[in-house]
Amino acid sequence: MKLDITRGIQNKGIEVAFEFQEDWAEDSWNGDVVRFCAPVTVTGTYMLTDETVVIRGIAETVIEGPCARCLESAHMPVHAKIAEAFVRDSGETILPLDEEQYRYQGHILDLYEAVRTALLLELPTRFLCKEDCKGLCPVCGTNLNYNTCSCQKDLPRRNPFSALAAMLNEDEEV
Ligand SMILES: [Zn+2]
Ligand SMILES: [Zn+2]
């Protein structure tokens, strides 16, 4: 996702439009493998002010990961705003630059890290295939979205947490 900013260097203070469409492969998020299952598109503008490049845009894709409850693949359309400033890295650092700051050299600016971070930050901490996913039976592992099993009706008695949950509910009512 390399942006050639030559036009912006020649026209400081003017917003220049750009767009990208790229296929990205796998990534990892919260310990899960996630996959970009649609091309990553970015549309936006960049503008040079002095030697800083201000990027504004919208990134979109669809990310696939395992559902936190049933482990089937869940698809999440993601729409992220990009608003970043890139500082020119001239190689001769006079002022100490912030380590977190995005840099660019010459007339090429790589948007990959900024776009990747913005997209992944839009993901929920837990992927769900659907809001009301019933998950797997904790006893036999049956996917309760598709099947039923006979463990479920015995569960409250076997589950050590149900007694605790009942106590907590009683407390709430007091
Ligand atoms: Zn699920
Ligand atoms: Zn079961």
Image (cartoon, rainbow, N blue to C red):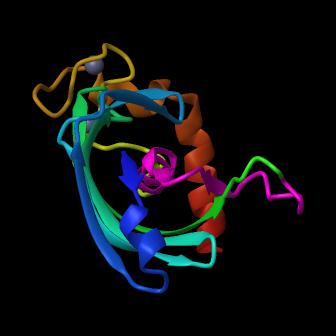
Q: Nearer the viewer, residue 165 or 10?
A: 10
Q: Please say if 49 is above or below 97.
A: below
Which stretch is magenta?
93-119
Q: What percent of the width, then of the height, locates residue 43?
A: 26, 65
Q: Nearer the viewer, residue 60 or 170?
A: 60
Q: Please say if 132 is above or below 147.
A: below
Q: What percent of the width, then of the height, locates residue 17?
A: 28, 72
Can you tell which quarter of the image residue 171 is in?
A: bottom right
Does residue 31 appear to the left or right of 78 in the view shown? right
Question: Per the image, is 140 magenta?
Answer: no
Q: Please say if 49 is above or below 157.
A: below
Q: In which quadrant of the rendered image does the N terminus lie?
A: top left
Q: Please say if 99 is above or below 55.
A: above
Q: What percent of the width, then of the height, locates residue 63?
A: 28, 42
Question: Per the image, is 111 magenta?
Answer: yes
Q: Is residue 76 visible?
A: no
Can you tell which quarter of the image residue 34 is in?
A: top left
Q: Residue at x 55, y 50 (%)?
A: 166
Does residue 15 appear to the left or right of 117 in the view shown? left
Q: How many tags in the picture? A: 0
Q: What percent of the width, then of the height, locates residue 102?
A: 62, 55
